[in-house]
């Protein structure tokens, strides 16, 4: 019964999964940075991605700015927005013991953004169509969609950028130090608010990139974001907290898993498969698939 | 006899509230519906309060247990399980609808709670809800798919039984939380939320108490789901398996003051009022205001209303 299974088909599914998974990965890196320094589960991540996708859509529709040319505008705007979200909403709450508060602020923000978008721009799905939307590049018998490939390249470049930033610059090192141990970081003179603002700016900046990648490849509507947040969280759990590369890889694993399960089982069940894997990972290897098991004291 | 004072006042308040359908026309007035919704929220909120407020385990799976209760009621009714004449407000059906979520709570609670802490437990329960949603949408004949199971709405005569049952369930939930927290169990739960290691070393079997609180919460949510199924007459993923049924109780509990008996009641009353008023006067844009209210309350009253005048409770 599996006659139709050719190597080409499997490879095509695999590539589609990887290309879509990098978008989960981008969102997961943002979540990982925010969770790492502040222990905040930023559930509104997906809603912000959709907001950025709308920005890209409007820049394209109203001002005829090509989606890929809008990367610097949206990236910068998203980083300012991220810093603003931290200073305005989380600065006070992050000091508190009770983690429900930050979770609920994130939920409130998600409600606010989603419904604001739905009221202002109607809940109808939108998509960007440019001259190259449907073009694809043939590689060894496989067709790779141009926009998805661009999404992949953008994801790779921004992951590399974030990794370099965290490893090579002093500010980046401060962010890493704060996510290792905030108390010790404070002792050596790292201001927690400064570090948190940076983490938020980068996290939301990545949302901007993910938003552009999403708006060029898929139709989106205001309520799509929550699913995206959940998927990013699954990617994060698969890859393990605290590793930028792990988060990206977690996203890619999830994307591949979904692409295969939606083909072999059926589209609707793909979500159940990814949540099932998520639960299994939480149960048996909560530190992430890609992290060596280390007992923290 | 100092201890009896809060109990008598709650019983009196319940009896007084029970008289409202005689005073106000239950079919025309909005008051009865509003209070019915408030009582439903109190049941869910007290359930969440027991797990998160007292035990410190943030669960995001209330809607899953709520829906399990509703689906159980609908399936028993549809399959005519006991070949009875009437399944409408049948106590056995309702109790079974509470017990099925308990079985699920034990099945996922024991492995999750023995391994996961804090945020991971929240994500795990959220994942459980999402799996359940996919299963219900894709379940074909068994779950009715995206349309869900329709119940014979011809049995509906008046809103009164809904009102009284909701009132009773809210009373029951509050009573369960009150008596659990006054007993050894409550002390153990609070000890776990304060410091797990210390609680464990003083001889508290942590997993048992965490699972107990989780199971009771699932039971209350299931009962409430069953009641709501009798109100909607259509048990569908869209009506029951939506995040609203998890987020509202969390919100109401935190706004009222989690880890207290009265806080969830205050929170439910206030937030149901806010949501009702905004949805009447600002139709279409009311979720925006809900979002703003959540953010403002969390920023300026993070410990809940009840702690505004009772410092250090």
Image (spheres, rainbow, N blue to C red):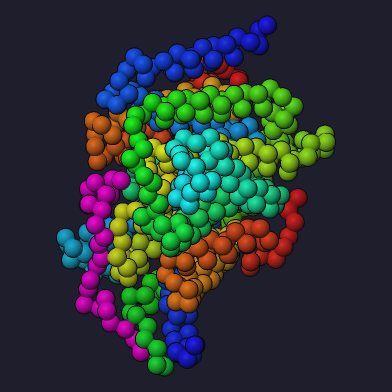
Q: Nearer the viewer, residue B160 or A10?
A: B160
Give the quadrant of residue A60.
bottom left
Report which quarter residue B88 is drawn in: top left
- Residue B129 appears in the figure: yes
Q: Is residue B128 above or below residue B187?
A: below
Q: Percent from the top left, x then y, of residue A190?
A: 58, 46
Q: Residue B51 magenta-drawn? A: no
Using the image as rendered, state which of residue B57 and residue A27 is in the foreground: B57
State the image coordinates of residue B175 (x, y, percent, origin top left): 59, 24
Side of A73 where B56 appears, left or right: right
Q: Position of residue A163 (x, y in %)?
A: 53, 65
Q: Is residue A194 visible?
A: no
Residue at image point 42% right, 41% down? B229
Q: Answer left or right for A224 relative to A283.
A: left
Q: How many marks?
A: 0
As for residue A137 lying within the magenta part, the answer is yes
Asked whether A203 or B244 is in front, the reply is B244
Which residue: 78% across, 40% down? B205
Q: Nearer the viewer, residue A35 or A138?
A: A138
* Highlighted magenta segment, given as a residue range: A115-138
In the picture shown, does residue A56 fall above or below A44? below
Residue shown at 67% from the left, 27% from the top: B180
**Residue found 25% across the figure and 62% down from its top:** A126
């Amino acid at each position: 019964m599996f006659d139709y299974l050719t190597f080409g088909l499997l490879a095509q599914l695999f590539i589609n999964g990887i290309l879509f998974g990098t978008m989960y990965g981008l969102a997961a890196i943002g979540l990982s940075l925010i969770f790492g320094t502040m222990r905040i589960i930023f559930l509104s991540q997906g809603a912000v991605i959709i907001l950025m996708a709308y920005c890209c859509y409007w820049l394209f529709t109203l001002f005829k700015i090509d989606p890929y040319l809008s990367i610097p505008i949206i990236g910068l705007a998203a980083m300012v927005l991220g810093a603003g979200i931290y200073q305005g909403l989380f600065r006070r709450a992050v000091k508190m013991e009770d983690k429900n508060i930050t979770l609920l602020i994130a939920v409130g923000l998600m409600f606010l953004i989603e419904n604001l978008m739905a009221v202002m721009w109607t809940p109808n799905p939108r998509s960007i169509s440019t001259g190259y939307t449907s073009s694809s590049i043939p590689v060894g018998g496989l067709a790779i969609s141009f926009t998805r490939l661009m999404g992949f390249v953008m994801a790779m470049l921004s992951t590399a950028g974030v990794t370099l930033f965290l490893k090579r610059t002093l500010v980046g090192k401060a962010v890493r130090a704060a996510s290792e141990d905030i108390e010790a970081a404070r002792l050596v003179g790292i201001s927690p608010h400064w570090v948190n603002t940076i983490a938020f700016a980068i996290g939301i900046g990545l949302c901007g990139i993910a938003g552009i990648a999403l708006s060029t490849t898929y139709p989106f509507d205001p309520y799509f974001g929550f699913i995206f947040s959940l998927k990013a969280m699954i990617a994060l759990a698969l890859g393990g907290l605290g590793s930028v590369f792990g988060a990206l890889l977690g996203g890619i694993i999830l994307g591949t898993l979904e692409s295969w399960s939606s083909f072999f089982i059926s589209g609707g069940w793909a979500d159940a498969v990814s949540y099932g894997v998520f639960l299994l990972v939480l149960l048996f290897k909560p530190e992430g698939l890609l992290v060596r098991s280390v007992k923290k004291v | 006899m100092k201890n009896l004072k809060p109990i008598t006042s709650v019983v009196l308040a319940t009896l007084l509230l029970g008289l409202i359908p005689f005073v106000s026309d239950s079919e025309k007035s909005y008051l009865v519906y509003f209070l019915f919704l408030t009582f439903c929220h109190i049941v869910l909120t007290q359930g969440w309060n027991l797990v998160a407020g007292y035990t410190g385990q943030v669960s995001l799976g209330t809607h899953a247990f709520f829906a399990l209760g509703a689906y159980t009621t609908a399936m028993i009714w549809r399959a005519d399980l006991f070949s009875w004449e009437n399944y409408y407000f049948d106590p056995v059906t309702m109790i079974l609808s509470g017990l099925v979520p308990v079985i699920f709570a034990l099945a996922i609670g024991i492995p999750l709670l023995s391994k996961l802490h804090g945020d991971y437990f929240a994500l795990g329960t959220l994942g459980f809800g999402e799996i359940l949603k996919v299963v219900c949408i894709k379940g074909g004949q068994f779950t009715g798919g995206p349309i869900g199971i329709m119940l014979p709405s011809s049995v509906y005569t008046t809103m009164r039984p809904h009102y009284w049952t909701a009132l009773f369930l809210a009373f029951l939930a509050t009573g369960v939380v009150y008596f659990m927290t006054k007993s050894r169990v409550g002390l153990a739960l609070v000890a776990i939320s304060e410091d797990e290691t210390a609680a464990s070393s003083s001889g508290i079997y942590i997993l048992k108490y965490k699972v107990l609180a989780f199971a009771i919460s699932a039971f209350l949510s299931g009962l409430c789901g069953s009641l709501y199924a009798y109100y909607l007459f259509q048990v569908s993923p869209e009506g029951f398996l939506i995040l609203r049924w998890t987020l509202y109780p969390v919100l109401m509990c935190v706004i009222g003051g989690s880890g207290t008996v009265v806080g969830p009641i205050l929170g439910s009353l206030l937030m149901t009022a806010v949501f009702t008023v905004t949805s009447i006067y600002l139709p279409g844009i009311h979720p925006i205001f809900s979002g703003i209210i959540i953010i403002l309350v969390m920023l300026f009253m993070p410990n809940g209303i009840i702690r505004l005048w009772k410092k250090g409770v």
